[in-house]
Amino acid sequence: MITGASSGIGRATALEAARQGARLGLAARNQEELNKLVSEIRLMGSEAEAFRTDVSVESECMSFIDAALARFGTIDVLINNAGISMRALFLKTDTEVLRRLMAVNFWGTVYCTKYALTALLASGGSVVGVSSIAGYKGLPGRTGYSASKFAMQGFLEALRIENLKTGLHVLIACPGFTTSNIRNTALSADGTQQGESPRNEAGMMAAEEVAIHILKAVTKRKNSIVLTRQGKLTVWLSKWFPALTDKLVFNHMAKEPDAPFK
């Protein structure tokens, strides 16, 4: 089961999982793009079903899991991938923007995991949270995004420890900057989408490569993965040289076109 499956990392993960023979329950708000993805997967010879879901709504998450269980009978892997970002100075940001990010990125993970957990415990399956380097290091201009990813990681880490003796596998996957539309749909200070990405995506890790890493980590039942050389360096530096890392992160993010801080 994959949330946020209609684009980016979610879509790439669905296609890669289909190549590996998985049966797929795919959730997202964009029904049209979900239907296209399901058709593509079925042409590959794999099973897939679309479930239109807004993960920020608890009842829709419950319906998604119930319908997926009715369709497939079991859940072996739940990949909580649905997410939105933001780009604005906190001083000027409407607090509703932070609420929206928490509703999707954190609560969406909580809701889907809650209703899938009994089935996952029965199958000895995997819960995956697609987090971010922003879940290890607060990023300026992304206060709500970083907060939601820190919260997601804390929730999943506690869940893993609770289930040390149950056989449940919990993976926290933290991509670095990845080619996807998450920056195009990122929220501005007033809650509108920013539109064009502020970053040059040419040198970023492709969503397809991220998908391969995530599925490999599920197979190996790893606790966590951090992707890209820059991402790994940021996490390492943050642990050992936090003040220096603050300055490096500030300077790096301030180079974005129209950065909200200088």
Image (cartoon, rainbow, N blue to C red):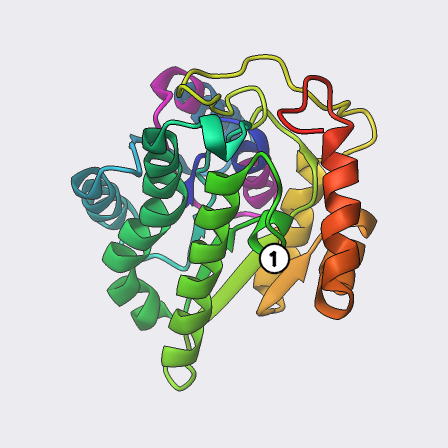
Q: Nearer the viewer, residue 246 or 142?
A: 246
Which residue position is annotated with label 1?
136
Mark 1, other Cα within 10 Å: few <14 / some 14–19 / many ≥20: many
User: At which x and y percent is residue 47?
Assistant: 43, 38
Residue at horizontal 47%, vertical 24%? 187
Where is residue 236 shown, x and y percent of the image? 76, 64
Q: How many marks?
A: 1
**Res 25 visible:** no
* Residue 244, above or below 262: below
Of the 4 image quadrants, the one containing the C terminus is top right
The type of residue carrying mark 1 is Tyr
Q: Is residue 27 magenta?
A: yes
Q: In the displayed image of the protein, which residue is found farthest to the bottom? A: 165
Q: Is residue 213 left or right of residue 125?
A: right
Residue that appears at 43% across and 83% down: 164
* Residue lying at 46% horizontally and 26% vertically, measured from the top left: 92
Which image quarter: residue 101?
top left
- Give x and y (percent) for residue 195: 55, 13
Lateral position of residue 150 relative to residue 202, left or right? left
Vertical placement of residue 192 versus 207, above or below = above
Q: Is 189 located above or below residue 9 in the figure?
A: above
Q: Say which residue appears at 35% left-offset and 57% top-offset.
A: 75
> Magenta stretch containing residue 18, yes or no?
yes
Residue stretch in magenta: 12-34
Give the SS element for disc 1: loop
* Viewer-proximal residue among 238 and 117: 238
Query: Does 223 appear above or below 19?
Result: below
Quadrant assignment, res 17:
top right
On the question of residue 157 being in view, the answer is yes
Q: Position of residue 89 (x, y in %)?
A: 54, 30
